[in-house]
Image: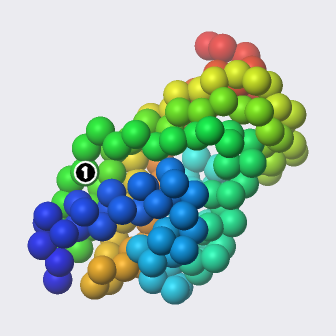
């Protein structure tokens, strides 16, 4: 089992690789059969390539998006990353309800990703974020 310090480093490496759009390095952080559960959208994928494709869809909609990590908590074989996704929607956002055209609006969405590791690779990840807040900020949903 990895130390808590190693879990924190591995979890941060995953976010840093996504921020850099370094898909080779991103996949190195994942088990080949990783399960990615995107709770905010209801999307669930299996396999490293599928998770990469899910993130590429977000980057098509928000090309400048960056995840800013505020904290990483680790215990056992699990790391929880607290972060804020910030970016501008300059591309279409494909959703289960249809495609949301580019709004040109900036969004800041708080999130957490709970990552379970098998050795040094992420075996399972649950990504929690406030989809209502995101959609409101880009004008796809009326404000509360």
Residue topped by disc 1: 72
Above or below: residue 63 compared with residue 109: below
Tell me the residue at 54%/64% (across/down).
22
Tell me the residue at 52%/28% (across/down).
108
126 vs 55, left or right, is: left
The reply to whether residue 132 is visible in this rendering is: no
Q: Image quadrant for the C terminus? A: top right
The colour scheme is rainbow
Res 83 quadrant in image:
top left
Specify few, some or many for label 1: CA neighbours under 10 Å numbering under 14, 14-19, or 20 or more. Answer: many
The reply to whether residue 79 is visible in this rendering is: yes
Count the numbered circles shown.
Answer: 1
Residue 59 pos. (x, y %): 67, 49
Above or below: residue 26 compared with residue 55: below
Residue 123 pos. (x, y %): 41, 78
Residue 31 pos. (x, y %): 45, 83
Tell me the residue at 29%/39% (across/down).
70
Dot 1 falls on a residue whose secondary structure is: strand
Res 1 quadrant in image:
bottom left
Residue 125 pos. (x, y %): 44, 65
Above or below: residue 132 compared with residue 14: above
Tell me the residue at 52%/86% (across/down).
32
């Amino acid at each position: 089992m990895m130390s808590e310090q190693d879990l924190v480093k591995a979890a941060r490496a995953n976010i840093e690789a996504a921020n850099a759009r370094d898909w080779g390095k991103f996949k190195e952080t994942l088990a080949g059969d990783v399960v990615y559960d995107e709770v905010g959208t209801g999307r669930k994928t299996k396999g490293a390539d599928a998770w990469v494709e899910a993130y590429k869809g977000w980057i098509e909609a928000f090309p400048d998006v960056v995840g800013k990590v505020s904290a990483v908590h680790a215990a056992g074989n699990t790391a929880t990353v607290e972060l804020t996704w910030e970016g501008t929607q300059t591309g279409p956002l494909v959703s289960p309800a249809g495609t949301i055209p580019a709004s040109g609006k900036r969004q800041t969405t708080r999130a957490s990703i709970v990552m379970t590791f098998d050795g040094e690779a992420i075996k399972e990840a649950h990504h929690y974020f406030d989809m209502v807040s995101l959609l409101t900020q880009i004008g796809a949903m009326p404000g509360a």
